[in-house]
Each structure stands twice: as C-alpha cells, then as structure tokens.
Image: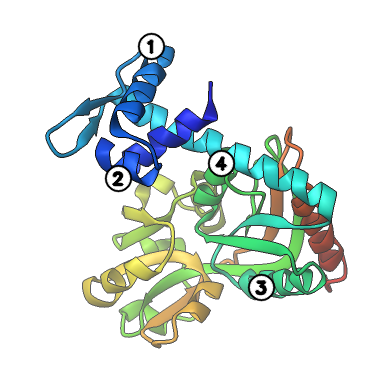
Amino acid sequence: MDTRLLHYFTVLTRVGNITQAATELHTTQPTLSRQLKDLEDEVGAQLFIRGKRAITLTDAGVLFEQRAQAILNVVDQTKRDIHSQATGLAGTIRIGCVESKLSAHVADWIAAFQETHPNVYFSLYGADGNSIRRQMDRGNLDVGFLLEPVESAKYFAHAIPVTETWGLIMAKNAPLASHDTITGTDLQGLRLIAPRRQIVQNQIATWLRVDLDSLNFCGDRNLENNMLPLMIHHDYYDIGIDGVLSFYADDQLAFVPFAPNSQTRHTMIWRKGHTPSPTAQAFIDFVTTQIRAMPL
C-alpha cells in the first residue's frame, strides 16, 4: 500500500472536505477523489460518505484512519532512527511519566542528556500508569516512568529508589484531614476516587486489610487536576500518593497517610520484543547509570 495515499486519507479526515484537502495537498479535487477511490478498492470497504459540505467516516473509515495514522507514525520514526544512526544521536525520545516525586528527577535526566546531545528532542507525556502502558503498547512511547508494581512479562523494568507514601487526599477542611493516619475503617462510607490500575487497587485493599468491594468507589482519574472541585466542594476523597500535592500550590488539599504505612517505589520501563531507536536506547542507558548512582 502506498503510504502517500494513507497521508492523503489522514489529511481528508482532518479537514473533513475533499476540496479543502486537495488544496492543502496541492492537487486537484478530481485527482484526489480518484486516488481515494483506488484506496477504498484496495481496502475493500467504503471509508467515507460524501456530504454537501463535509465527509462522514464509516465505521471502517474510523478504524482505517486510526491504523493509517499509526503506520505513518512508525514510518516517520523509522526515518528519524535511521538518520540518527548516520549522523549521531538525534531525533525524538518519547517519554511517559506519572505526576509524583520522580518528576523532578526525570526533568534532571532529560536536561543532562540534552546537554550532551543537543540534537535530541523530547516529547513528554504526563499521565497515570494505565495510560502510559497503553501508549507504550501502541508504540507511541519509548520509555515510561511509573509506580510499581509492573507486569514483568511485557516490559523490561529498572527499579528507582524514589518512594511514594499512599494515603487519602482531601479538602483541607475535611473532617479526616485532622487525623494522623487513615485506616481501612475510616474509608467505609466515603465517596472515593480510585486509582485506575486494578493491580494498584488490589494492593491498597491488601495494605488496609479490607474487602475491595466494601469501598464506595464513585469514579477514577488519571491526573489530579480535574478532581480538585469534587474534593474541595463535594466531599470526595482521592486515594493517591503524597508526591501529588507538590503539583498543587493552592494549599486547598490535605494528605493523610494510610496505617499501616503503605509505600511503593518507582520504576523505568520499556517494551520487550521491541528494539528501541539508538537515541532511546542511549537515554535508557544514561538513566540506568543515574539510577545506580542514587542512594538506596
């Protein structure tokens, strides 16, 4: 399949109109229409329906647009990787990182690596562990920094001695904010926001010696910011880590640790069964060296 046609199709889906797409691609509308028809013939399905002002993707078109964009991303990344082999370290390192105490360390590592390799560009993706792993599985990230535990069958992992304490995040004036610690009994009946990773939810239930089904989980979240109004104005409580509060300077939130004390470390992961680009591998090796020099 000609990747040029994939590019034409993704431009069409972005602008939503064949005439506008033809203008952007510096071709004529009849020529573009014919090439898109050839693409549909090759795929064996109708990909879009023409309207008076815009096109509408069929179900097949929605799927094809996702796959076409993924293919084009791989082609572009491959070109950059080959170029970096010929010219020295260059290209993009795609990094996923949770919001935690580790964020400052990751920033230091990126800055130090770019100081040595100024032609390297980084793309930083902030999310929770579920989103980072999903993007990594799709080939959209080279390396991820997240909290343990990690599925060892899918990823190479290097533990990082930066520890987070788990507990309850809430409004500063919430009744439980005055407690020294939070137990499993304290959580009963509260409107709780859960971490999205099931493996983490199970770990929390084990730490607190509670049945997970006894907790009133009303929702989950990837990052904290959109949860602030729920906690501050509507008496919701978020199960999270103490490092999160360093990202919110408004002093409206409180953190109280669990009892018994519940802690996890961070880890750096990258995919098994996949060869990183030379630039990504150099970054992984560089960070590994930095981690080994950290105090335990």
Which of the two discs, 1 and 3, labels the residue nearer the N terminus? Answer: 1
Disc on res. 107? 3
Dot 3 amino acid type: Ala
Q: Are circles 2 and 3 on residues that touch, CB within 8 Å?
A: no
Residues under labels 2 and 3: Cα distance? 36 Å
Q: Amino acid at mark 1?
A: Gly
Q: Which mark is residue 44?
A: 1
Circle 2 or circle 3, nearest the eye: 2
Q: Residue 97 lies in what quarter of the image? A: bottom right
Q: Which percent across, then down, holds residue 131?
A: 50, 49
Which residue: 55% across, 51% down?
132
The answer to whether the residues at label 4 and label 3 have Cβ atoms under 8 Å apart is no
- Residue 186 in the image: state x and y as whole percent: 39, 67
Q: Residues within 10 Å of mark 2 (few under 14, many from 20)?
A: some
Select label 2 or label 1 by which is in front: 2
The residue lying at 44 percent from left, 80 percent from top is: 248
Q: Which residue is mark 4?
A: 73
Report x, y in % for residue 152: 71, 40
* Left or right of 260 on screen, residue 182: left
> Which element type, helix, strand or loop, lies under badge 2?
helix
